[in-house]
Image (spheres, rainbow, N blue to C red):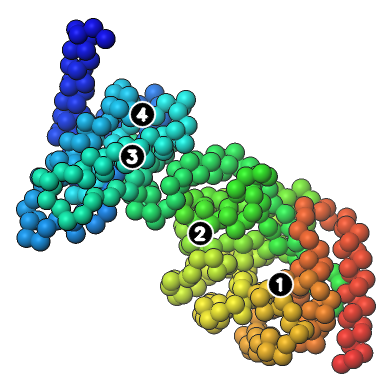
Amino acid sequence: MHLFGKIRQWRMRAKNRARLRNLIEEMPAISAAFSMDDPLLLKLDELRKRNRRCALVLFNVDNFSQLLYPGLYDQLTAAEQIISRHIIQLLPAYFKDEHIVGLRHFHGEEYGIFMEVPYTITYMEMHYQCLKLRDELANRLKEKAELRITGQIKFGVGFFTFEKEPISTKLAISVAYHYAQAIATKKLPSNFSHTRNELSDIMDKESIHVLTQPIMDLHSGDIFGWEVLTRGPVNTPFYKPLELFEFAYQAELLPILEFIVIKKAFKEIVERSIREQVFINITSLTLSQRKFYDDIVDYLSLYPSIKPKQIVFEITERHSIRDYREMAAVMGKYRKLGFRFALDDAGAGYASLQSISELIPDMIKIDRSLIQNIDQGKIKQALLKALMQFAQDIECEVIAEGIERVEEADILYQHAVTKAQGYYFAKPARMVEGGNLPTQINEMRDKIRLRAQISNQLA
């Protein structure tokens, strides 16, 4: 390269470094409230209005205060300035100058880079650049004697793209910081931002579907009710319900997802003329939200043929109940509308038994762990007997889950369990129109009636 070309290049790099240094110096810490004329807020707000994708890259120094020599904590500010300076020097090698919106130094050991990320850059490309920058930064600081530390500085890195409109830019910054910090400190996986965006798109399109599994009456052989089961899009990490709901909880999208399930279930009930009771899983976290209550009331008005007494909210133990008195009051509001409640996973642990005694549900569902191979041991049968007596004392109906073998079903007859569901009766499938039952269920009805007759004769 010609000498003058090199000089221009050096000047440009120096200009960029000066610009980045000024960005750090002119911006307050994120812990302070954002004012309306905050330079970073204004720049990010402008980009979002132009539909540009913004993101926060956060570098977190692990146990930084523990790295300093004892008695030299006054060196902390100097060390922070050294780290900031090296971040400024390294940035142009990994990210284009025009993509860097601003930098901030948060809370001592955190350094944030606010960026515009073109849609042509994939998450994996962005993540890879962040990791390379982190590694080179750590290597540069390794031999810096002026840092006066006792060990090597190690950085965690978190990357999170901003929430879409309509939330404000101020709130979007707070959300980005919250998640980027959790990723940098390994409380969330490194691909969290990408996965959350995928899940958010799925929920925006409501591209999940519901299946149902019948709950059988063990005396008549008739269908007592249907449990609604959820599946995400096929060939995605969210197809199975456990992964779908667990990640929605981590991403703080669970109430949105659970309301989508209710919308899908109501639509199926009306279109297929379902007259039996319908069980819909719900967490205490979602049930406690006032907006969820208001949305349920509004949505019911769209389907006048659905009466609340037809719907049984099945409270799952996926997330523990912290305040039983508050939860009982919440359930009382829904009960006034006509909704009923079942408590899931009875017999799986102390927490579920406490939930039953504190909340007094209309029904309890005995966990599959108690039912599996119950015919092969007396201990599980003794537990079942105790649960049945407990339910009788509080006038609560019992439903056994997870029945897969005829021998398990026979034990239920012996202990006066009248309602059950599981693969032995039918696998989850699409809802069917009233009276138009699959051959499998009609055959199972005959089997149940036969087993009930045999059980009565043996009693």
Please name the residue shown 47% across and 58% down the image.
289
Q: Is residue 179 above or below residue 16?
A: below
Q: Is residue 33 left or right of residue 458?
A: left
Q: Earlier in the sequence, mark 2 or mark 3?
A: 3
Residue 271 visible somewhere in the drawing: yes
Label 3 or label 4, whichever lies nearer to me, is: 3
Residue type at the position of mark 4: Glu
Q: Quadrant of residue 48?
A: top left
Residues at discs 2 and 3 in contact (Cβ within 8 Å): no
Q: Secondary structure at mark 2?
A: helix
- Residue annotated with mark 2: 286
Please name the residue shown 23% across and 7% down the image.
2
Label 2 or label 3, whichever lies nearer to me, is: 3
- Residue annotated with mark 4: 116
Q: Position of residue 101 (x, y in %)?
A: 28, 29
Please name the residue shown 6% across and 53% down the image.
74
Q: Earlier in the sequence, mark 3 or mark 4?
A: 3
Q: Quadrant of the C terminus?
A: bottom right
Instruction: Identify the disc placed on residue 401.
Output: 1
Residue type at the position of mark 1: Glu
Instruction: Identify the disc placed on residue 57.
Output: 3
How far separated are the C-alphas under marks 2 and 4?
34 Å
Q: Position of residue 277 (x, y in %)?
A: 73, 64
Residues at discs 1 and 4 in contact (Cβ within 8 Å): no
Please name the residue shown 91% across and 59% down the image.
439
Label 3 crowd bin: few (<14), some (14–19), many (20+), radius 10 Å: many
Label 2 or label 4, whichever lies nearer to me, is: 4
Residue type at the position of mark 3: Val
How far separated are the C-alphas under marks 1 and 2?
24 Å
Q: Secondary structure at mark 3?
A: strand
